[in-house]
Image: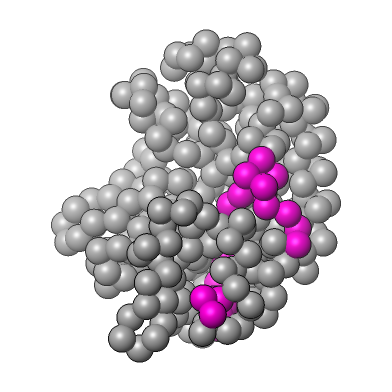
Amino acid sequence: MDTFGARLRRAVDERGPLCVGIDPHPSLLSEWGMPDTPEGLERFCRTAIEALAALVPVLKPQSAFFERFGSAGIGVLESTIRHCREAGALVLLDVKRGDIGSTAAAYAQAYLAPGAPLRADAITVHPYLGFGALEPFLEVARANGGGVFVVALSSNPEGRTVQRARGGDGRSVAQAVIDEAARCNQGAQPLGDVGVVVGATTGGAGQRGTTADGGLDLGHLNGPVLAPGLGAQGATVDDLRKIAEGLDGVILPSSSREILRFGPDPADLREAAKRSLAECRKVR
């Protein structure tokens, strides 16, 4: 199997830079005229896959919206991942796991190991037990052509206390996470497998390429940047450009409600995704 970085690079080159979240929030189920049940969940996901999986490079199911239904919801998540991949999209499972030792290894096996029912192309993780604690995720990903996106700078205000705090060397925590991800990606061609998450509404938190004012240096990442928040959360193409400036890698804007609100008609969903793709192609 190709590396995740190679598959992502190829998918973005062919389809454009966009990740669409599959977020079956109760309010969206209602707007789509579907019941807030496992059956409604499955109808929602199948509709989104039918409309989007052959168009956009990456689909991102949010695990929490499936987990709330217990085993029935997890069953829908399993089939959603499988159907997305069969239809040609890469799957980034948004689980934001982060733990240590054998527990981290078990999570990695659950989401990235061959034969796992929930196996995705890549997952999101938290680094706040130490970047080194992510090694079980990185190891399983490397061995099986998977990817890992590490949260660096999120858009929620509560995250600033941790993510923008500075260590003894003057770097912000977010920058330290990016530097560790870049170390993992050294020498990878055409793209590394370890991405970072930088909220699109942060605009990179300052002037690009500088860290003294809270900005982020992504010039050495050699990997993908997942930038959630496009559209409904207020981020614009100009915000994305600030993050992409000087980036060594791929920026992958992520949009969920801005596109999903046009459902449940598959044709309307496709048109919304096409509009977002056209905007995202202007970033770089």
Q: How is the image coloured?
A: one colour
The image quarter in which residue 37 lies: top left
* 226 within the magenta span: yes
Start-end of magenta stretch: 213-238
> Which picture quadrant has residue 134?
bottom left
User: In the picture, which quadrant includes the C terminus?
Assistant: bottom right
Looking at the image, can residue 255 be seen?
Answer: no
Q: In x, y percent, where is residue 279?
A: 81, 53
Q: Relative to residue 72, is residue 132 drawn left or right?
A: left
Question: Is residue 271 at all visible to an observer of this figure?
Answer: yes
In-image side of 284 versus 193 (left or right): right
Classify 165 as above or below 183: above
- Residue 177: image quadrant is bottom left
Instruction: Give left or right: position of 242 versus 176.
Output: right
Residue 116 higher or lower than 11, as above or below = above
Q: Position of residue 65 (x, y in %)?
A: 44, 30
Task: Decide which of 201, 11 is in the foreground and name it.
Answer: 201
Number of dots carrying numbers: 0
Q: Nearer the viewer, residue 193 or 258?
A: 258
Query: Residue at left 67%, top 52%?
Result: 235
Q: Is residue 195 left or right of residue 108?
A: right
The location of residue 267, given as percent across then percent down, is 80, 27
| Residue 218 percent across, percent down from the top left | 57, 77
Q: Residue at x 71, y 57 (%)?
A: 17
Check the image and name the residue furthest to the left: 102
Task: Say which residue appears at 43% left-offset and 62% top-offset.
Answer: 160
Residue at image x 77%, y 46%? 276
Residue 263 lies within the magenta run: no
Magenta-drawn stretch, dominant element (helix, strand or loop):
loop
